[in-house]
Amino acid sequence: MKEKKQLVVETVLNKMFEIAGHDIRYNDILGRTDKWYQQYTMSTAQNEEWKQWGIEYVAKQLRISKGLAKKEVDMIDFMWGLKIHNFQTNLK
């Protein structure tokens, strides 16, 4: 089960980079000790799209409820998720 869960995490992270429009993969960041996660961002909408996709994918692959899958994806986001940029306009 541990190997399958690792593969699921890798796939979810690769999808995060894809949705955010970054040409990078899990294997590119594996073992990096710098603050690579500060180099890449995603929008709130991209984050929501990624999380929704991730919940469906994790639930199906690990055969768990969507509630548990949401917790898994939230943990992945907390640990490795990209910084969210929010462009605010018309602030005066």
Image (cartoon, helix red, strand yellow):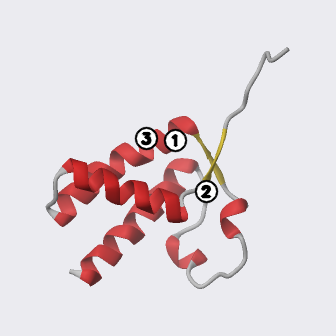
Q: Secondary structure at mark 2?
A: loop
Judge the density around disc 3: few (<14), some (14-19), many (≥20) Cα neighbours within 10 Å.
some
Q: Which mark is residue 22?
A: 2
Q: Which mark is residue 74?
A: none
Judge the density around disc 1: few (<14), some (14-19), many (≥20) Cα neighbours within 10 Å.
some
Q: Which residue is mark 3?
A: 49
C-alpha span from label 3 to label 1: 5 Å
C-alpha span from label 2 to label 1: 12 Å
Task: Examine the image and state in which quarter residue 43 appears.
Answer: top right
Q: Secondary structure at mark 3?
A: helix
Which residue is outermost to the right? 92
**Which amino acid type corresponds to the residue marked 1 in the rendered image?**
Gln
Q: Are marks 2 and 1 in contact (CB under 8 Å)?
A: no
Residue at the spot x=85%, y=14% of the render? 92
Q: Which residue is mark 1?
A: 46
In the depicted structure, whether residue 14 falls above or below residue 7: above
**Which amino acid type corresponds to the residue marked 2 in the rendered image?**
His
Residue at the spot x=46%, y=63% of the render? 13
Task: Examine the image and state in which quarter residue 88 appears.
Answer: top right
Percent position of residue 68, x then y: 24, 55
Percent position of residue 74, x then y: 41, 54
Judge the density around disc 2: few (<14), some (14-19), many (≥20) Cα neighbours within 10 Å.
few
Q: Nearer the viewer, residue 14 or 3?
A: 3
Residue at the spot x=68%, y=82% of the render? 33
